[in-house]
Amino acid sequence: TKYVFDLKENDIYFCTADIGWITGHSYVVYGPLANGATVLMYEGAPNHPEPDRFWDIIDRHGVTIFYTAPTAIRAFMRWGDDYVKKHSLASLRLLGSVGEPINPEAWMWYHTLIGKKRCPIVDTWWQTETGAIMVSPLPGVTGAKPGSCTRPFFGVVPKILDDNGKEVPKGSGGRLFLTQPWPSMLRTLWNDDERYKKQYWSEIPGIYFAGDGARFDKDGYLWVVGRIDDVLNVSLVGYTNAGKSTLFNALTHAGVYAANKLFATLDTTSRKLWVEGGGRVVISDTVGFIRDLPHGLVAAFHATLEATAEADLLLHVVDSASPVREQQMREVDKVLNEIGAGLVPQIVVWNKIDLTGVAAEVEQDDYGRIARVRVSARTGEGLALLRAALAESARVREQNRAAGVRPDIAAGFELQEDPCR
């Protein structure tokens, strides 16, 4: 805590994590208080009574260090810059990111709008199991690359290994291991020593397997790709009458809830189901958009909307029999952009072909990628083609992961000098 956040006697430290989460344990309570820091705690929503709640707290209480998650940052971006610009945020001197790899666009927004291009950002990589930050820039020492957690903390020795346990060259992707012990490491799982050994120590005996794919670049900076055991997370989006619920049922046999022409899965235990023959693919959500959500539904579907923005692939379901389908597609695309999902890869699913007399088929774009699949969820025509398209998307994703390529890393994000240097 002292070195990563460069704690000073007069700092006011604000970590937005839930106190029940590991970040709340380690970096709201233990670390800051052990160092005698002044800690600000807030219990409540970041958008109540207005979406500038955090910025108001920072200005009113003179917060100097702000530590939050990329998911929250992307929500702030969607809510708009105007809520930020109402506040000076002049007290801030350091920003932090925790919970998942931060995409470069969110990093740049955080740096520019919140940090005013003067606050260093510590993009921290660690896990519940590690108990403490393992990899992070040090303010005033480490130059930053948006999207990279940069270099290991003192005494932490990560290595990127292939399936045979051999270290891969810089720039190549592999699996992330920690090769030396550290003070806050987990000792076991509750009443299950064997599972603990199998889960974390069986991949290569004697070395801790983090479960993440990653790579070191030519400068020795660590880029964490994401979980090795992740499935392809697919969200169904579309206009309210596009037949998303029928398609969802046809693919997963999961129940959906319909209210006021908005469809969303509510059963969190059954909404993530394997697609038969699709390999590492899961259909996780189905969401229909309307302009004005009834007040009582906004909170209920907030998590589903967030999941859509975080999806690996969107199935944009279109009612091919609708005379206003082009307008509906534009409206859905507008909402996707508003929630930060505009850049998520899409396959357009033209549903209800049984009503139009069009044959089931797969169409590709100019780059050879699957762009459109024509199906009928009611009759089942074309569903095999859609399953094959999902399997191909999963294969490409695994191929990119093996190569250490994150799909959200755009070209041109170079080393950013730390403003404290």
Image: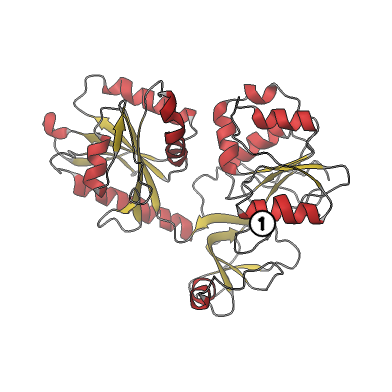
Which residue is found at the position 15% from the left and 39% from the top? 378
Vertical comparison of 420 with 31: above or below = above
Of 378 and 408, the residue lying toward us: 378
Q: Quadrant of residue 104?
A: top right
| The N terminus: image quadrant | bottom right
Q: Helix or strand or loop: what does disc 1 sit on?
A: loop
Residue occupying the far bottom of the picture: 205
Numbered marks: total: 1
Vertical comparison of 128 with 147: above or below = below
* Residue 171 visible: no
Label 1: which residue?
Answer: 221
Of 316 and 78, the residue lying toward us: 78
* Residue 229 visible: yes
Task: Residue 388: give x, y in percent of width and height.
Answer: 26, 51
Image position of 187 (left or right of 388): right
Task: Residue 307: give x, y in percent of width and height.
Answer: 44, 42
Image position of 304 (left or right of 245): right
